[in-house]
Image (spheres, helix red, strand yellow):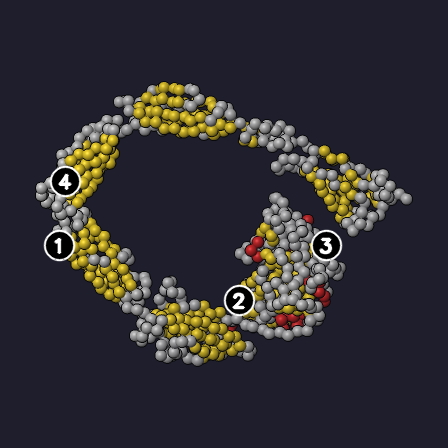
Amino acid sequence: MKLKIAATLSLFLAVCFNGKSQIIIDNTPTPTDLVTNTLIGPGLVTSNITFVGNAQQRAFFDGTGSNIGLADGVFLSSGNVGDVVPPNQPTTGTFGAPGDPDLLTVAQSVTSNPNAGGINATQDAAILEFDFVPNGDQVVFNFVFASEEYTAFINSVFNDAFGFFISGPGYAGPFASPAAFPNGAENLAVVPGTTDPITISTIYVDPTQAPPLPPSLNASYYIGTPVGHSFNGFTIPIEIRFDVICDSTYHFKFAVADCVDDFLDTGVFLEGGSFQAIPVDLSLETNVGNGQFGDSVIFEGCGTSADFVFTRPSCQSGDSLYVEVDIAGTATNGIDYGLIPDSVLFLPGSTEIIIPFDAFQDGIFEGYESVIVTVTNILPNGDTIVTTGTIWLLDNLQVEANAFDTTIVCMQDSLEVFVEGLNGVPPYEFVWHAIGDTLPDTSMFVTGTPNGSYDYYVTVIDACGFEDVDTLTVIVDQTLFVDAVLSGPASSCLSDGWVSANVVGVTEVIGLPFYNWSGPGQGGAISVDGTATPQVLPTGWYYFTVQDDVCFAEDSVFVDVIDPPIADFTMNVAAGCSPLVVEFTNTSQNSVTFEWDFGNGNVQNVTGMGSQTETFLTDAIVTLTSYDASGCPSDTQQSISVEPCGCTDPTATNYNPTATIDNGTCFYPIPSVEAPNIITPNGDDLNDVFQMIITNAVNVDLVIINRWGNVVHESNGLNPTWNGKTPNGTLVGEGTYFYKYSATGPGLNPEPVVGHGFVQVVIEK
């Protein structure tokens, strides 16, 4: 049982943005306040705290009125932090501030985003950095990633980025780090269990995505329904855990930024108090494994003991550490188990303290008794960390051996006898004294013996070492048994086999013993009374029974066949397009002549094992009959499937409506597009609209870009047009505009026809 120690911080802050049943935002705390009073938990000392970005991009948050999943903490955004509070929308937080080169590298490295190579800039970066010294061997914190880019811009260039960059001893990476950390930094913000950075393109659920983009990726981490906040999508709380070296100095950088544009915002919520070093660990280690009851169960009087093991990181060994131990529960300290002290003290240089734990057997059945352990750790800086765990004491009942007595009549070669273990602690061992072995099994075999009563002794030993002995009695009451049955083989297609039986111990009275043979025969079953050996029999199973005035016995034997013919063949192909040419290979055995019936009206009688070749226009069943030298037959069948093949796509030029299998011969018309080079959007219904002449296309994507590289219009469909206006309805100015299109023709995976050009916009009065 592992008892993990966790710290809790309580905060009370004034707020600037709030509302009923929604997230609360306060952007008045300084970066130092956010780090030291909100983010950092026990076991860390911080310094050199800095923030790069606009003051409106950082805040304390209270998430209890939302479904962010974190109670409170630090919020960093690429936009205005207040926009996350409903009814605001995080869409217009534009500060015109620079981005971050590390975040650009992160955004471009998302291999699942086919447009990652088009990401050429980041903007409005919010960057919180600090140095820290851990008082432990691991550091942990929790966060939630959220974005307004969900879900419309998944796998696009607007793939906003964030990162958690660590630099210091044991870390080296491609990202920037302060001069005091020359080995660079690593990004810890990755999808759990992978090396993929976390972005809207690596964690999402979006059924509207069309192939080849998947409808979801790492969907178990995604939440798409906001409550009490305004982000379109966000992750569940995710834990970051990383190794450190005690008392060494590390640098940490939290960063988030927009990609390409600075319009829709993205944020990261960092849980308050969660950035902490892993503190003292307490475990209970038992010396008997009881998978049936769990590691927290100790058996009284089972030879079971345990150790309380207190451990702390080596970097804490220079100081004393006082740990208070409180024992409660239904079991009594010092009476039901060895006395546990109310405290332990780590002396300088000590990293482990072991306290033995023994449960006494008092002979009283009390059921489960609890031992509730509450541990209070008082750290050198005065912080206290409290944890509680429960151990269960269980009375050990005396194991019982329950052997099953058996009475047997007409026992043949051997008899299986059984025993079970009761009330003890599994697993059990079984010692059968008749054979002197310790076995894991609950049974053993005893061999046939003369009539009489026989005792076998078995000891059952449970996992605690307790044992019990029982006597298993086998009563044998028999004189009759079948000593042996014999058979001789039959020739192929002939009934010339034989069977024979030998019976001992017959008790004869009037009308008994009664003997009977039964089995296959010409025209049905045969029945032969008496011990005379039945002759001239076909192949098959034969059953022998005998009954006297004591018991009944039976046995069976098989009459085999000598080298029967076996028809068999293989085909190089069993299905395909008409006409289908098939080669048949004869693999028959013990045969000299063959009849091939190809199921298409063609029958061949041959005397050799040579292969056959046949052409099929329709489905057929092929039958091969083979004969041995005496004319005994054997046959086998296989099916041939023939399908009409051709182009099955109705959109193709060479579509074949009778074809059921597509043979890859489809070809399609190539789309063509003609575009105007001038429009006059003055409302006179003459040349007001940019409209292309399109043929052989099922969809055309159109993009219009101004001379500064800004997109002023996007549309798609069978005939996309542009009326010379921006998306907000404003008429563009006169000048030259760049257009590009991608026309997709029919078919499953058509290669799009792309083109571009310039169009002159003239505003005529």
| Tag 3 near tag 4, CB within 8 Å | no
Q: Name the residue under label 2.
A: 138
Mark 1 to mark 3 CA distance (whole Å):
97 Å
- Within 10 angstroms of label 3, few (less than 14), some, or many (20 or more) residues? some
Quadrant placement of the C terminus: top right
The total of numbered circles placed on residues is: 4
Considering the numbered disc 1 on the image, is that residue within a helix, a strand or a loop? strand
Identity of the amino acid at label 3? Answer: Asp
Q: Can residue 126 be seen in this view?
A: no
Q: Name the residue under label 1.
A: 452
Identity of the amino acid at label 2? Answer: Gln
Q: Name the residue under label 3.
A: 261
Identity of the amino acid at label 4? Answer: Phe
- Residue 495 place in picture, x, y as percent: 22, 28
Considering the numbered disc 2 on the image, is that residue within a helix, a strand or a loop? strand
Mark 1 to mark 4 CA distance (whole Å):
25 Å
The mark nearer the N terminus, 1 or 4, is 1
Q: Mark 4 points at which residue?
A: 514
Mark 2 to mark 4 CA distance (whole Å):
84 Å
Identity of the amino acid at label 1? Answer: Gly
Q: Residue 674 vs residue 428: left or right?
A: right
